């Protein structure tokens, strides 16, 4: 099964930092209750496994393919309840979302860290909010529901699923805008 495959992959590639049962160690946090979405985000963006310890986990080429990532996510989801991976249909609905609402929500909830244009920004202690340009809608949605690293989690009570899609629409529209520059 997917969970069994994930168990083997976890024991080989994750347990040295996160513990055999995902309980965490001095080298890695607990994974109990993080949910499949957090694993999918961290692994499919190449942030996990970490290349080296540091102030912030850097994005890199993923170490696992999509099938392996889904297996790891399924296994970690057995550690306790947490956000599930949003479906493709759910995420792809961003194209029908409200651009104006997305811009307002982005400026209110995201711009203070990711910059008003979504190009990223510096945080404290050597951390930063990464650029959102070129990021897959799936990963943006997963980041909003799991709160990776310094980012807060945005529950459906704080930002509804429809509002999350509007934010994604604003980001994807901003990404396609031409960079005119100065005189």
Image (cartoon, rainbow, N blue to C red):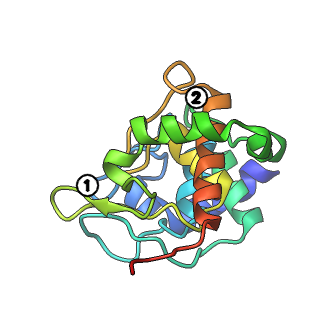
Which residue is labeled 1 in the image? 26
Is disc 2 placed on a helix, strand or loop?
A: loop
The C terminus - image quarter: bottom left
Q: Relative to 101, say whether 21 is above or below.
A: below
Q: Residue at x 45, y 58 (%)?
A: 118
Give whichever of 89, 121 is nearer the camera: 121
In the visual, does 84 lie left or right of 124? Answer: right
Above or below residue 114? Residue 141 is above
Q: Is residue 123 visible?
A: yes
Residue 180 percent coordinates (x, y): 51, 75
Judging depth in this view, the residue of 116 and 76 nearest the camera is: 116
Residue at the (59%, 74%) spot, across then down:
62
Task: Kindly indicate the quadrant of the structure image that contains residue 110.
Answer: top left
Residue 157's x, y, as percent?
A: 53, 18
| Residue ranking furthest to the left | 125
* Crowd tier of the residue under label 1, counting other residues whose Cα lies within 10 Å: few below 14, some 14–19, many 20 or above: few
Report the front residue among 73 and 164. 164
Residue picked out by circle 2:
81
**Visible residue check, residue 150:** no
Secondary structure found at label 1: loop
């Amino acid at each position: 099964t997917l969970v069994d495959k994930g168990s083997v992959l976890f024991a080989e590639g994750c347990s040295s930092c996160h513990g055999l049962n995902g309980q965490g160690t001095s080298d890695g946090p607990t994974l109990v209750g993080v949910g499949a979405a957090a694993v999918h985000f961290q692994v499919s963006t190449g942030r996990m496994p970490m290349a080296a310890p540091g102030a912030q986990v850097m994005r890199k080429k993923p170490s696992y393919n999509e099938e392996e990532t889904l297996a790891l996510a399924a296994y970690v989801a057995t550690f306790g309840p947490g956000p599930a991976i949003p479906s493709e249909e759910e995420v792809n609905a961003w194209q029908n979302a409200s651009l104006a609402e997305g811009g307002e929500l982005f400026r209110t909830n995201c711009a203070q860290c990711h910059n008003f244009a979504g190009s990223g920004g510096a945080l404290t202690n050597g951390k930063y909010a990464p650029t959102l340009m070129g990021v897959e809608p799936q990963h943006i949605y997963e980041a909003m529901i799991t709160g990776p690293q310094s980012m807060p989690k945005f529950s459906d009570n704080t930002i509804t699923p429809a509002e999350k899609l509007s934010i994604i629409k604003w980001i994807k529209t901003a990404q396609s805008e031409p960079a005119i520059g100065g005189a």
